Image (tube, grey):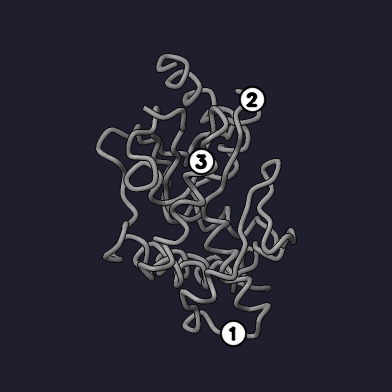
Amino acid sequence: MSTVVAIDGPAGAGKSTVARLLAEKMNFTYVNTGSLYRAVAWALKEAGLAVDDVTQEFLDKLVLEYKNGILLVNGVDPGAGLRTADIASGASLVSKKDFVRSHLLPVQRDAADKGWIVMEGRDIGTVVFPDARCKFFITASLEARAKRRLAQAGEVASGATLEEVKKEIAKRDEQDSKRELAPLRAADDAVVIDTGDMTPDEVVCAMEKVISAAM
C-alpha cells in the first residue's frame, strides 16, 4: 500500500485548500494533479493552439515536472496562468482524451517516490493510486461550490453571476462524471466528507484522524 493520501472531488469542493493545509500540518508533499491538465491546456494556449489540437507528438515534447511542490512546464512556472477560467475549461476538455491521461499517469505516480504525499484530483483514489493508504472524496452542494468559486480571484470570468457560475460548475461536473475514461466518482473505500458547513481546518482535523489511524 502506497504512502499516498488521495483526495478526490468535484470543482469548488475545497480540495486544493484542505490538501495544502493537510500537507503542511502533517509535513507531507502536496501534489495537485489537476494542475497537470491545466498545464497542458496552458501550453497549448501559449503555442497558439486550440485544445483539440493536442497530439501525442505535442505531449512528447512537453516537459512537466514537480520541483519543491511547484509544477514547471518546460522549465517555467506558469503561476496564476493555470488558474484562469479558460484554462480550467480547457483542462476539463483535454482530460477527456485517453492518450493525454495515459501520458500524464506516470508523471503523477513519479511524484510519490519520495515519501508521504497528499495528492488531489478527480481520479486519484480510483485510477492513479487505487492502493493509496487513505482516500477521501470531498464534496459540497452546487450552491456552496459556486459561492467558493466566485470568491476565488481568476477562477471565473469577470462579472460572472452566481447562477452563471453554478451552470458552469454543473457542466464541468457532467463532463467529469460522464466521461468514459476515469470518470469522477468516489472510490468504494473512500471517506466521503461534505464540506458545505465545515471550515477548512475542521475538514483537515477530520482527515488527520483517519490518516493517523492508518499510519
Quadrant in the picture for residue 8:
top left
177 relative position to 47: left or right: left
Residue at 66% over, 56% down: 152
The span from disc 2 to disc 1 (Cα, nearest Å) is: 39 Å
Residue toward you, 55 or 40: 55
State the CA–CA distance, disc 3 to disc 2.
Answer: 13 Å
Which of the image's four quarters has the N terminus? top left
How packed mark 1 is, by other alpha carbons closer than 10 Å (few <14, some 14-19, many 20 or more), is: few
Going from N to C along the chain, the mark reached first, 3 or 2, is 2
Residue 167 found in image quarter:
bottom left
Q: Tell me the tag on residue 49.
A: 1
2 or 1: tag closer to the N-terminus: 2
Question: At label 2, which amino acid type do we have?
Answer: Asn
Asked whether the beta carbons under mark 1 and mark 3 sit within 8 Å of each other, the answer is no
Q: Which residue is mark 2?
A: 27
Residue drawn at point x = 47 percent, y = 44 percent: 109
In percent of width and height, residue 180 lies at: 26, 65
- x and y, in percent, of residue 110 in the image: 51, 44
Q: Is residue 200 above or below residue 59?
A: above
Between discs 1 and 3, the one toward the N terminus: 1
Q: Which residue is mark 3?
A: 119
Tag 2's secondary structure?
loop
Q: Residue at x 60, y 42 (%)?
A: 17
Quarter of the image with the C terminus is top left
Identify whether 90 is placed above or below 211. Answer: below
The reply to whether callout 2 and callout 1 are in contact (CB within 8 Å) is no
Q: CA distance from mark 1 to mark 3?
A: 29 Å
Between 50 and 112, the residue placed more toward the observer is: 112
Residue 6 in percent (x, y) is at 44, 37
Q: Is residue 203 left or right of residue 69?
A: left
Label 1 element class = loop
